[in-house]
Amino acid sequence: MKYEKIFSIVATFYIAQPVSDENVTVIDTDFSNIPVRLHVPKRKSERKRPAIIFIHGGIFVFGSCKITAHDNMNRLISNKIGAVVLGIEYRLAPKYLFPAALEDCVSATKFFLQEKILAKYRVDPSRICIMGESSGGALAATVTQLLRSDPEFKNRIKAQALIYPGLQLVDTFLPSHREYPHGPILHREMMFKLASLYVTEDSSMIQALLRNEHMPEESRHLFKFVNWSNFLPEKYKKNYVYTEPVLGKVNASYPVLMDSRLFPLLANDSQLQSLPLTYILTCEHDLLRDDSFIYIARLRNVGVQVFHDHMEEGIHGALSFTMGAVALNLGFKIRDRYIHWLEENL
């Protein structure tokens, strides 16, 4: 059985039903024909509410905003800070290739940001945050970039929150890739197998990614955006020597990998400098760690205000480990730090 099938089957066992309680109303509905879940606080307030747009992870092939860990978190946020939380059920690969997931996230977000919809849920248009974790962090970062360049919506996003996001696969030899190829949790080869399903049906891409020989001939000008030797803190460079990715042969290169809508780290500096207040949480023991460190450095270099929360004991995916037999103190700690940041900044 293929990886994506196994993960999808397992995920279905953890889907939470849309059950309201005395504090929060939970609604499953459609925004622009895209399934969404809303958590709406019941308590009255004279002040309009903040809102969080939540985009789940799952390497683009599995996952749901409705899994119990996410549902519990969004319910807690809704009740604790009085926020409306919108979770988006975007289309998944391999059935739907790039840019399907992104298009769904953009469409559902724009629907929610309409004045009449914000008014319906009493949302303050100046207090909205887009949040994503793991591959959902890539989607959240891209949605934020796109909306901030859209005159109709650029002032509707106050903040973005990215939890251990995967932001590029241009260079697959970053130090964190070399330190943690076998996890914990996220394995390099498994990640490439699943992530490749979002962009192509050609399985040869996996081996090209493993060798760092997958980028098209015309992509060299993009390497400066992900050159870790220019952006990582000294302690992460250690004994590693930077070498450029090897430009792929014609049959092993994929032009889609040059698209900044797929990899938000490829956005140029003029695009980045328009971005809002940013929260990024990174985990030390995570092969995606260095993606975030590069993004943080680039954002700060162009004047974006960034709050960086680094978990020295952190592992990828810990935010999902807050339920039942798989609960970890680390998962609760990450969740609580993220919620505290929301309380302070929304």
Image (cartoon, helix red, strand yellow):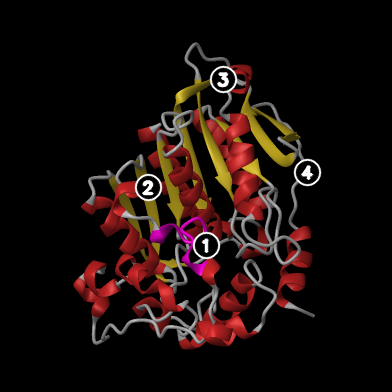
Query: In the figure, residue 289 lies in which quadrant?
Result: bottom left
Image check: 267 left or right of 132?
Answer: left
| Image coordinates for residue 129, horizontal then vertical, percent | 46, 37
Relative to 315, is 240 above or below? below
| Real-space CA distance between mark 4 and mark 3, rounded to the nearest whole angstrom | 29 Å
Image check: 158 left or right of 270?
Answer: right
Q: Nearer the viewer, residue 231 or 218?
A: 218
Q: Are marks 2 and 3 in contact (CB under 8 Å)?
A: no
| Real-space CA distance between mark 3 and mark 1, rounded to the nearest whole angstrom | 35 Å
Foreground mark, 2 or 1, reads 2
Q: Earlier in the sequence, mark 2 or mark 3?
A: 3
Name the kind of residue labelled 3 in the image. Glu
Task: Name the residue tied to disc 4.
Answer: 17
| Image coordinates for residue 207, horizontal then vertical, percent | 57, 87
Q: Nearer the viewer, residue 153 or 58?
A: 153
Relative to 259, is 114 above or below? above
Query: In the figure, residue 290 lies in which quadrant?
Result: bottom left
Task: Name the residue tied to disc 1.
Answer: 318
Q: Residue at x 80, y 80 (%)?
A: 1
Residue numbers of the magenta segment: 257-266
| Real-space CA distance between mark 4 and mark 2, rounded to the nearest whole angstrom | 30 Å
Query: In the figure, residue 284 lies in which quadrant?
Result: bottom left
Q: What is the number of the mark on residue 279?
A: 2
